[in-house]
Structures are given as C-alpha cells and as structure tokens.
Image (cartoon, grey):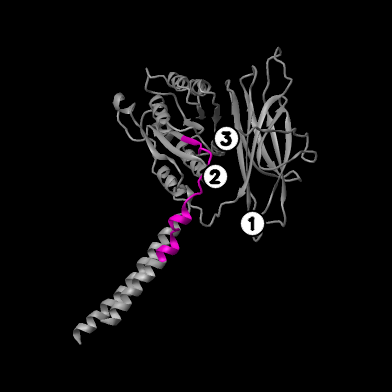
Amino acid sequence: MIMRKRLAAGVCTLLAALVVGTFPTGAAAADEPSGKPSPKVELVLDVSGSMRTRDIDGGSRMTAAKQAFNEVLDTVPEQVQLGIRTLGANYPGNDRKTGCKDTRQLYPVGQLDRTEAKTAVATLAPTGWTPIGPALQAAARDLKGGEATRRIVLISDGEDTCAPLDPCVVARDIAAQGIHLVIDTLGLVPDAKTRKQLTCIAEATGGTYTSVRHTNELSGRVTQLVDRAADPVATPVATEGADSCTNAPQLKAGLYSDRERFAEHRWYRVDVRPGQELRASVSVAADRAVNNDYGVLLRALTVHGRELVRGQESGTGRTDAISTGLRYPKPPADSDDAQTGAETVCLQVSNSFSAPPAVKTAPGLPVELNIAVVDAPDKASDVASFGLGRGWWLLGVLALTGLVSGVLWGWISRLRFAGRTN
C-alpha cells in the first residue's frame, strides 16, 4: 500500500513538473503595464466567393490573403491590440437580406495570441456576399472606446453587393462621429469600380488606398499600416536616394521619405546580418495628374549587381498611391550559404509614371520607404502556412505527458493487481 501511494505521488509530481515547465506562470506571462493607451487595429478581410479567383502569384486571392495575414501576424508590435473581422465568410445562399448581414469578428480586438489568430485565419474559405458597409459599421463598434489610436485595414477584391447601404456614406458617417478612426483600403487585383469605391472609403477618413497584385505587396503594406498605428506620431525621416548603389545613403530600420522624378531609379543601402531578414516596402504617391499606365519596382541586389528578390506593381487607372514590397532572408552564420559579417543590400526604387505635357514634373513624386530588419523565421519549425504558427511544440508536450502518465499508471495497476492476489 505504501509503495502504491508513493508511485501515485510520483506520477502527480511528474505531471505537475511537466505542466509548470511548459506553461509560464501568471506572474511571468503578465505584460508590464504601460502608461500610453495601446493602439487598436482591426483587419477586415473580404471572404466572398470571388476570392476563389486564381490570379495572384499562381494561386487564389484567398490563399494570398492567408499567407499575407500569417506574415503580418508574425510582426505585429506587442503594444498593438489587434482584431480580425470577416465579411462574406459564412452564408453561401442567394438571400440578399441574409447575405448582407454576413460579417463576424473572427478574432477579438485585444492582446494578440499569434497561434490562435493564425488558426482562426486558416479556417476561412471563400463563401458569399460582399457586405462592406455593414462590416465597416461593425468594425467601428469593435474599436469603440478609449483614447487610443484606431485604424481599420480593409482588404477586398470587389465592390459592395449590399446597396443601398453605400460604404462611402458609412465611411463619411464614421468620420463625422469625430472618433479619429482611420480606414485604409487595399484592393486585390481591382477593377475600375472597385478602385473607385475603395478610394472613396479611404479618403473619407483620411486613410490611404493601395492596389495589390502580389502576396508580398499585401503583407508589406498591411505590416506598414499596423506599424504606423503603433507609432502614429512618427514622421518619416527625410533622405535622398542616389543614382547608384555606390553613392547610396546607408539606412537602418525605419520610415523614410524622398522624392523621385518621373521614370527615375533611386538607390539606398541596408546592412543585413546572418540570420536576419530584410523586409522593405515602398509607396509612390501620384500627387498630380498622371497618365493611366504606370508602375513601381522595388529590387534588392548585392553590391555586385546580382538580384536577390524583387517586388513590383502596375496600374492602369488613377490611384493616390501605388505600393510594393519584398523580403530577403540572409542565411544564418552556421549555414553553407552564409557569409561572415553583415551583407550590404542595395535597394533600387524605380517608377514608370508619366504625365501629360502640361503637368509639371518637378518636384518629384513623394516616396515613402519602410525598412524593417528582423530575426528570420525558423524554417524548420515554421508551419505558418497551416495557420498554426509554431504551436506544434504544445502537441508534442501533451503527447509526451500522456505517454509517461500511461506507463506509470500501468505500473501502478500491476502492483495493485499483485497486491490483491497476494
């Protein structure tokens, strides 16, 4: 009997040790209080049926959105309270009244659990209508209260399908409330009507509209907007790009502004150490009348001119800004491909804007360059594409706990049986 009690106590002690060692205590996990109100951001994602269209980097718009969301969730600043709302994700039928109510909060605005948020995003599938107006009204309620900075980032590939509730009118009503809520919009492979509506929504609240045709452009721009919410008073640092990498200014992580002439190439330099990842995005604003066909290119090259990665975007209609982005992970120092020390990466920003003869081309177009240098994700454990982040360690610990407890319980049962027979 004494032996059985000791073994039972040992099992409890072992399981307690596994749990305590695996999960941080409340005191250790609690965040330090901050005197500054945490900014609030809600990502509003269109999950309507048209998101099945396969025209972004060889995959569907939904696949591109999921991948971009996973990358954005990895880099959300700790002080940001972030939420996710969907529109058109649940009702597949033809009833307009029901379809135009199809918006729900997928992840509540608050402290971000990256694994939980990714898991929620992974469950999404293109389904129904496009109730942009109702989604914006609900998102404004989600962000209500407090004195913190508030921002809605709307990602959609089509017009609202729930007229007469005009989303432009909804945005103007939100602005008229004086709650200082900004709505930024991103159009996935937009047509002229979608571009016009999303631009109207953004302009009503002082936000920005961006046309997106590639996954890296989407993740880069959303990351830029979330970072801007985290530090809304930060102003871009003025810099001046050069005509070659050799003469280019050396930049660190941060937000920079410049001006670029029509059809010009400008160069900048960034140092990236082994095991780090360079994430850069650029926006070129059309602050005057321009011709309809235009584009912007962002390239990362070695100092010897070898291209590492590029991001590009083009448009055929008027927009206030056109953006693109890129990511370049430098191999860790212990890999076969790594070089010792930091690598200088040359960033080239180019545009193909042109203007009617009567339009002045000086000064150049406003350029905003956002640079981040972060620790590169661990590819061996990165399963973000499945929406689970790096949460597999939890499953492993639970499996190990179950195995150990099963073995020990089997020993206890054998001893109890032997005691009874004796």
- Quadrant that contains the N terminus: bottom left
Secondary structure of the residue carrying tag 3 is helix
Identify the mark at residue 75; answer none if there is no mark: 2
Q: 172 or 410, which is in the foreground?
A: 172
Q: Are marks 2 and 3 in contact (CB under 8 Å)?
A: no
Magenta-highlighted residues = 18-42
Secondary structure of the residue carrying tag 2 is helix
**Which residue is rendered at x = 34% and y = 31% of the image?**
102
Point out residue 152 in the picture as x, y percentages from the top left corner. Answer: 48, 31
Q: Is residue 176 above or below residue 52?
A: above
Location of mark 3 (residue): 228
Callout in the foreground (1, 2): 2
Secondary structure of the residue carrying tag 1 is loop
Point out residue 77 in the picture as x, y percentages from the top left corner. Answer: 54, 43
- The answer to whether one can see residue 189 in this image is no
Splitting the image into 4 quarters, where does residue 301 fall? top right
Q: Amino acid at mark 2?
A: Thr
Q: Earlier in the sequence, mark 2 or mark 3?
A: 2
**Which residue is rendered at x = 77% and y = 38% of the image?**
248
Within 10 Å of the Cα at label 1, are there few (<14), some (14-19), or many (20+) other Cα atoms? some
